[in-house]
Image (cartoon, rainbow, N blue to C red):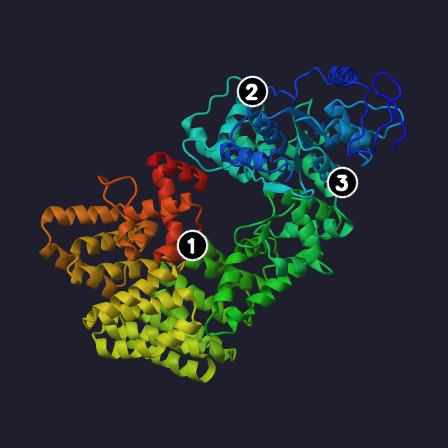
Amino acid sequence: MDSPGICETCGSALAPRLATSRVSRYCSNACRQRAYRQRMSVTPSEPDLPEYPDAFVGRDAELADLVPLLRKHRLLTLLGPAGVGKTRLAMELSRQFRRGEGRLVEIGRLTRPQQVVQAVAEAAGVPEQQGTPLRARLLTELIGRKLLLILDNCEHLVDACCELVDELLARCPGVRVLTTSREALRAVGEAVYPLKGLSVEGRPWSEAERLFVERARESAATFVPSDADHDLIASICARLDGVPLAIELAARLVRPLSLQEISHHLDRRLDLLNIGHRGAEARHRSLRAAIAWSYDLLSSPEQSLFRRLSLLPGGFGLDTAQVVFDGDVLGVLTNLEAKSLISREANGRFGMLESVRLYALERLREHGEEALASERILSWMCEIAEPNATTSILTEDQIRWQRDEYDNVAYAFARMHDVTDERRLTLASIMLRVRFDQGYVTEAGATMMDVLATAPPSSRVRALAVEYAALLAMYEGRLDDALAWAEKAIDVAEANGQQQILCRVHRTLATVRVARGEHHEGIAALRRSVEHGLRHGNDVSVAVAKQNLAWCLLAQGDTAGARDLISSVLPRLRQHARPDIFTIALHTAGCAALRTGDLDAALSHFEEGVRIGTEMVRALVDCVEGIGMVEVRRGRAERGLRLLFAGDAAYTRLDGAREPYWREMFEETVALAREVLPEQEFEHSSMSGCAMDLAQAVDYALDEESWQPEDEPLLSARQRTVAVMIAQGMTNVQIAARLNISHRTVESHIRNIKTALDVSSRAQLAAWVTQQSS
């Protein structure tokens, strides 16, 4: 038998009873009810949650996700960096949740782990009782209550919060916990929802812009943005990464400053954005204070890496971060991500919000580490870039590295002030190479020419830079200059003993010759390129030279020779070449097959080129047009015309021109379609094609059902099938397998479906399907 206890209400002795799973604390139901009324009398009489004087703006998509998550999970953490709006979103979410009481626990104001239990008890209205530990009393009192506890800003007391939350969820079935933190609790059953900045895209006003305007009006009642202000506000919000705290602080400056002045001074944002509400906590009164709160919680190695990463504004991978850190970087980098000071991007790299990076740069300079970290990064970049000047063709990994690191290279270049440092030429070459692929070469080209004029003549990169000067001149239509630079590149490479790149520079010379209409000289240069490649290059480089030669033979009318040549190198290119190079080769093979009347082979080559999905837009457009040419010749002139004019529209947007031989084929095919189609059908098909963007044209090239005229239903039959599968919970991979289409095509279908229905999530799409079925 248990020893008799004391009634917690009246103090009377409790009658002894056999041990049970639940020991009584009261002598009667009357005392139990009296105790309940006493507990309610000490519950704060003010509203459950704080009221805000300003309007809540945006986050509609997040709330649509979070309300069901909070119903499903008893512990939900809003995770994100400083100033991203976790607390305000948590308050709004709790109001929309409306299930039981809501109590806010401001963990951010606490300084010691021991204070967590007391803060939760106070918020829940559970008083201390002499002789009973407060933790035990809290757990007992909350057993029968239906309560949503909001633990706000837990990052500095994560362990203490996690320990208490684990106990609450295990013993109090009516309790749910919503936490905000810059670091996850890692508690049992925790659902984590990463929070980013507000959307900076949207019409007519994005969420970020609407927040700026709303807060600006609160600061200056007369503020009314004009149409001319729209772009400026959008730029301010984008430069602030959509971070609500930064946007609100910037918006409050509209009274003393103009929008132009705010934008102009954003490079000094940590000094500028420092006039938050007087009632706000100290760490939310300025942008610098908000970030400093997170920085001060880091260990010494974490602070060191955080500071040095500020020199990589273009993001970084694990290998890049290792360059600036002494020791094993993986664990430290993971901790920085867990604490929301860096984030993992969609491409697998890490990045910092610009405001966070500027704070880290301040600390880097404060510690006197800037020069050393900069030199490490610069040396690493030049070491990685060495193949640019020593190989006859770059690999896909090398091209990807250049694209990934472009912003970092440009940042490093801008910080180099010694014009005699030959490493400037290396970085300028990388920047121009990347911009060639992107189609924006004017600024990078001017930079290259400036650096080339001051770089040492003996630089190992000089032959590469001179070759790029030839390509730049050709791009700008200065064909005489292009020829002079191309010939000089060969001379420099030979003088410096760089035999391994002669295959490449002779290919460049051939390109210039062909652009000048000197086809025989271009063919001769390509044959020399093949010879040098066989002696000093590699198989892929030789195969590329032969594919270029095959295209020249096509243009000269040697269709049989061209088809034999491209057929001989296509297997090697399929196995080893970059996607952009292989797509070009497939286009050449498709043209050769088309010219010989082998429509099946031509279609196969063109479709494979489209499926590769290369980032080289021109090669992709050419393959789309190739499919259109096949379709016209197969008697499907309407479909073929749509594809041809979709390609024509893409060329117009690229501000580019087809190569002469391909232009002749295009015009020949359009004329053929005009002969077989009535004028009205010809015009309708061509206009339909012009209305397509490139993504729609690619979809239509591979899947005829992906497009429908304007007078047909909102979704095509294929799109409706995909929508139904999404509503059934199928993944993109499962849909692709079921419909026997590529994963990329499924993604494109979903993108087009969302655009057509004006929805932003799979859940909204599923709801639309359900509504249509009812």
Q: Quadrant of residue 425?
A: bottom right
The image shows residue 651 at horizontal and vertical percentages of: 30, 54
Q: Depth check: 630 or 121 in front?
A: 121
Which residue is pictured at 31% across the width and 63% down the height?
607
Specify the quadrant that holds the C terminus. Answer: top left
Could you tell me which secondary element the residue under label 3 belongs to? helix
Residue at figure coordinates x 63%, y 52% from the top left: 311
Whether label 2 touches label 3, CB < 8 Å:
no
The tag earlier along the polypeptide, 2 or 3, is 3
Residue 163: which disc?
A: 3
Residue 218: assigned label: 2
Residue matched to label 1: 734
Please state which amino acid type lies under the numbered disc 1: Gln
- Nearest the viewer among 453 and 402 is 402
Few, some or many residues within 10 Å of mark 1 (<14, 14–19, 20+): some
Amino acid carrying label 3: it is Glu
- The image quarter containing residue 124 is top right
